[in-house]
């Protein structure tokens, strides 16, 4: 997933939840620190995220989730998670429930969500 696609999901998430920030969990959080990652490094089609201030609004993100019209239109989607989500790696070794280095808060821009696929 390219950074511009992650940004697109974040803009949509911001409009849906009314939040100015979303918490991105997992591999797509790397885009926050390393915006020029090679495409081969981050191949997933979903952004694991949650609303930062109103966790109950995270569920609203299913409207841009797996098999949604958003997913059908763009080929990527939001995967709403909650604060009990654990990150797993190295054959299932769990991180603490609130990892800090693996969670990156990304501010969605105020740009309107496009109804057509992104170009470029």
Image: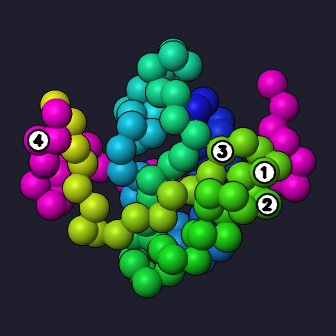
Q: Residues within 10 Å of mark 2 (few under 14, many from 20)?
A: few
Residue at position x 51%, y 16% from top?
A: 40
**Quadrant of the image containing the N terminus:** top right
Determine the CA span between mark 1 and mark 4.
Answer: 33 Å
Label 2–label 1 contact, CB within 8 A: yes
Q: Is residue 45 left or right of residue 42?
A: right
Q: Secondary structure at mark 2?
A: helix
User: What residue would you read off at disc 2?
Assistant: 69
What range is drawn magenta here? 91-120
Asked if residue 47 is positioned above or below residue 28 in the image, the reply reads: below
Determine the CA span between mark 3 and mark 4.
Answer: 27 Å
Determine the CA span between mark 2 and mark 1.
Answer: 5 Å
Q: Secondary structure at mark 3?
A: loop
Instruction: Say how many tags the image has.
Output: 4
Dot label at residue 93: 4
User: What residue would you read off at disc 1?
Assistant: 72
Q: Is residue 108 magenta?
A: yes
């Amino acid at each position: 997933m390219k950074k511009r696609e992650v940004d697109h999901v974040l803009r949509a998430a911001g409009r849906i939840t009314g939040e100015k920030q979303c918490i991105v969990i997992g591999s797509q959080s790397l885009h926050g620190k390393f915006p020029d990652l090679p495409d081969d490094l981050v191949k997933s089609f979903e952004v694991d995220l949650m609303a930062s201030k109103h966790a109950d609004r995270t569920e609203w993100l299913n409207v841009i989730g797996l098999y949604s019209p958003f997913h059908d239109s763009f080929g990527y989607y939001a995967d709403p998670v909650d604060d009990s989500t654990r990150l797993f790696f190295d054959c299932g070794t769990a991180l603490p429930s609130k990892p800090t280095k693996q969670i990156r808060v990304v501010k969605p821009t105020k740009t309107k969500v496009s109804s057509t696929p992104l170009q470029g």
